[in-house]
Image (cartoon, rainbow, N blue to C red):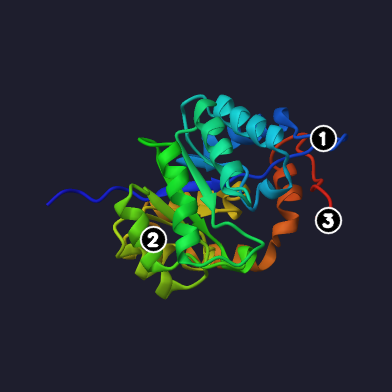
Amino acid sequence: MGVAARPAVIVALLTPFDAEGRPDLGALAAHVEFLVAAGVDALMPCGTTGEGPLLSDAELDSVVEATVRSAGGRLRVLAHIGRPSTQATVRAGRAALAGGANAISAVVPYYYAYGDAQIVAHYRALLDACRGEQVYAYTIPARTGNELSADALRSLAAEGLHGVKDSTKSFDRLLEYLACGVDVLVGTDGFVRDGFAAGAAGCVSALANVRPELFCALRDGEDVQDEILKLRSTLPLRRLKGAVGELVAGYPEDYRAPLP
């Protein structure tokens, strides 16, 4: 019997902005150095925590490229490139891979209501455009208004989808995804421990921007789930940048409007 792979700690990377409201790539690089030193496995720039939907296409490309450059091969970069349209998602996926990302992730398309057939077609187009690369789906129905069903995921797995980031906040759905034959990344801090025990390939956490060592300890077998839950209850997501600023000199606290 082979040895099970160690689950990966992936940071849902914040995007810092300078005084003019542009992505602050120097602050991003300093933050990446902090995360490298903490021992995390990978970074996911430009997702929900990274304010990806509020970035222009050019900004998205530049933040992904800066993350790759700052990681310098020491960490994997799983770039989030999901946009509302299939065409824009394909463009961003190709650009991220050309910029050095190790893998790409795309959120379930949002704003309009979509069924399984449309969602599968969306990801199929991305898979076809990026054939041979690692492509992940990302499901967060509370934000997108659309579900990624287990049947849709199973169909996409057969077409080459590598994995899914699950932010449904449903452990039952997590277990359904685990039965689909793809890597599952836990996107809910409340059950990272249980997700790892069930066979998840890793976690993607916003809190890991500030306390990466907690998630690395959990990955390495220490039961610190209660500490993670306590941190979640005392550190709202809109205070994450301020918390990073206490650890990384010069890290700015501003979010992009209309976020506070």
Residue 208 seen: yes
- For the residue pair 100 and 76, the one nearer the viewer reads as 100
Residue flagged by tag 3: what amino acid is it? Pro
Residue at image position (54%, 40%) is: 90
At numbered mark 3, what does the secondary structure look like: helix, strand or loop? loop
Identity, as a three-letter code, of the amino acid under mark 1: Asp
Disc number for residue 248: none
Name the N-terminal-most of marks 1 and 2.
1
Labels 3 & 1 near each other (Cβ < 8 A): no
Q: Kindly identify which numbered label has been placed on residue 260.
A: 3
- Residue wearing tag 2: 153
Residue 75, image x, y percentages: 47, 33
Q: Outermost residue toward the right?
A: 20
The circle on residue 18 is 1
Instruction: State the SS at label 2.
Output: helix
Amino acid type indicated by mark 2:
Leu
Which quadrant of the view contains residue 154? bottom left
Q: How many marks?
A: 3
Q: CA distance from mark 3 to mark 1?
A: 15 Å
